Image: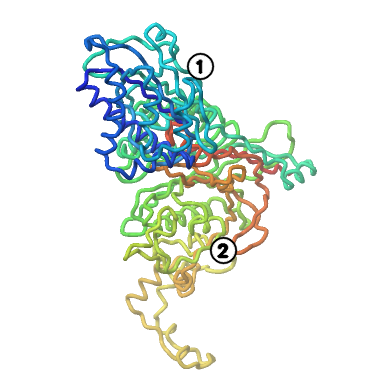
Amino acid sequence: MIGTVLCYVLLPAARLLQALRDAFFTYRKNVLLAKSPSTQIEGVFAATRGRSVPEEQEVLLRQWLEEGVGNLPASESVPAVRKVSVTLTSDWLEGSQLLMTSLSDLNTSPEVNQCPDQQHSELNALASSELQDHAVAELARLPSEDTVTVAGSAPWAAVVPQTDHQAAGCAGINVEVLNDDPAVLAWSLACDAETVPLTLPARPIQDSVPFYPVPTEMPYHEILWRDWEDLSVQACVLEQVSKNTPLFEFRVMSYNILAQDLVEQGLDLYVHCRPDILNWNYRLPNLLQEIQHWDPDVLCLQEVQENHYWEQLEPAFKDMGFACFYKRRTGRKTDGCAVCYKHSRFQLISLSPIEYFRPGLDILNRDNVGLVLLLQPVLPEGLGLKAVSPLCVANTHVLFNPRRGDIKLAQVALLLAEIDKIARTTEGSYCPVILCGDLNSVPDSPLYKFIRNGELSYHGMPAWKVSGQEDFSQQLYSRKLLAPLWPSSLGVTDKCQYVTLCQPKKLGRREYSRDFLLQFRFCDAACQRPPQLVLLEGVTDAKPVASAREHSAVTAVPKRHNYLSFLGKQCSGVIQHGLNLTSVYSHFLPQRGRPEVTTMPMGLGATVDYIFYSAEPVENKAGRRLYKDGALKLLGRLSLLSEDVLLMADGLPNPFCSSDHLCLLASFGLEISSL
């Protein structure tokens, strides 16, 4: 509920005029910001919006002065202390306009006391003089303490004015000039009567009108409550239980914790936040407490500031039982990615940090990084001769720029190639994979579909469309993706595999090195057509020519790979991968009928953070691949929130959540097999 309370103290005529002007505009703005769904209350103020500001002032002042100034006491040196409170409440509606509005205009109204016989004239003056309709007429006939509720609208309450001897028992509203979010102000004024101080502190009337602080208590833990969704009752898991096959259970968290340097470089993104909750000394304990509360076994963090990691985060994580690995972004960036795991649950097999920056390549000229770890689960004692597959965990933070989808795709392709190398087994299959990170792409965007469906036709696609973050379709010029997306010198195929590893070795071949054989490509014996070779015009009748361009291109081709085939696939405009990944989250809240969000830049909710995991494909339906759990089973997840809920809690960050992203948490079970 949004409540607006105006209390005024009668002042000498000159100051009264200015006080009434200021009070009118503050009250009018608060009403408009409330965005009440009531059509009747909207109608009352619709006419006042269309009139000029001076006309509104004159109408209001004339009505108030005619009825109020005549009641001034004879001696103005000691004004009569009589009070009236008029309260307007309206249903809370979410909206980024309210969240992002400056509070400076909302908490600058002075206080003036008026005589008791002015309460109904005030109500009539606040509404438009052109709309003295049934609702206003009903208010005029009410007794002093009655409250009327118009159908479909919020209640209007006229409170009995208190005299001097009654002031001690009068409930007061504290108002403080805070650099705070209007959502906090709105929620606080709507709190129950128990949260309002019972006495109004006596303060002398000075040249400046006194103010009293607004209680800013908000039940953040209730608003931001996140349920744990138990998915262990799914058919595939129940089938596993029926087979008495044990599972190695563990939790994975992905969290963009918002680097402090990025906060200070982009303060305009956090104008809705109080400065104190943006302080690192406030945020750090909140973040550590949240991580410790959910107790993950594997922790993937993004936007980890380097000095904070080495000085504070790593020591704290080690005390929690984590082994930690960190990769700072290249260039002059001060943040990076970290992967931590409980050393009591996993052992490290291999570690591969990834730098996406490649000198001389325009498509890979940014400083983003990633980490890929291969972990071996540690089975508890007493299981006998049991074994469990290794687990590949990847973490990354992809470029933000919405216009450069080509760079995002190339970065993801490099990450998938590294995962392909680390997770590939000797039999050619893959061990279970979990991919976490801030991908700066929304669900059902081309980049998201590429990861989930394993294929993307990108040729001719506008670069801004890849991530789906913003719509730049109205621009006259936009960068388009052309095939091949990256040069062959990168050493990555269109299947997101390193070309040196994309084909298994065949025994009995290549007894001589490739470089040795290339020396004889253009020798006389090699350039003579064998007599038994069928003569085909344009195919076998021409002799090879050793041009410098051909030589450089061929030598750049990786081992065991035909150059023409390699070039043809690169120019197809289609990229693929074979990891079979699906998302932990569905990206929609059926109970609320709204999409899930993981972040709220500038008050607008979006999903850009993900946890993908290995699954078994079932079928392709309407271009979308369907999956079922395989050896790695999803047992549960921490629910996400919708945009309207986050707006009620001041957006992100807020005093309860100290990052501009929500954490993602999922529970998995890995099949344990007999040796």
Q: How many marks?
A: 2
What residue is shown at x 55% (from left), y 40% (from top)? 640
User: Can residue 258 be seen by looking at this rendering?
Assistant: no
x%, y% of residue 586? 59, 48
Amino acid type of the residue that numbered disc 1 sits on in the rendered structure: Glu
x%, y% of residue 460? 42, 69
What residue is shown at x 46% (from left), y 42% (from top)? 599
Most foreground residue, 216 or 338: 216
Q: Quadrant of the rendered structure where residue 603 is?
A: top left
Left or right of residue 259: residue 419: right
Q: Quadrant of the rendered structure where residue 280 is?
A: top left
User: Can residue 124 be seen by looking at this rendering?
Assistant: yes
What is the residue that sits farthest to the left in this orientation?
Answer: 14
Most foreground residue, 368 or 520: 368
Left or right of residue 581: residue 658: left
Indicate how the structure is coloured in the image: rainbow
Return the residue at label 1.
194
What residue is shown at x 56% (from left), y 55% (from top)? 452
Q: Which mark is residue 505?
A: 2
What is the residue that sits farthest to the top in this orientation?
Answer: 165
Amino acid type of the residue that numbered disc 2 sits on in the rendered structure: Lys
Q: Dot 1, crowdedness within 10 Å: few (<14), some or many (≥20)?
A: few
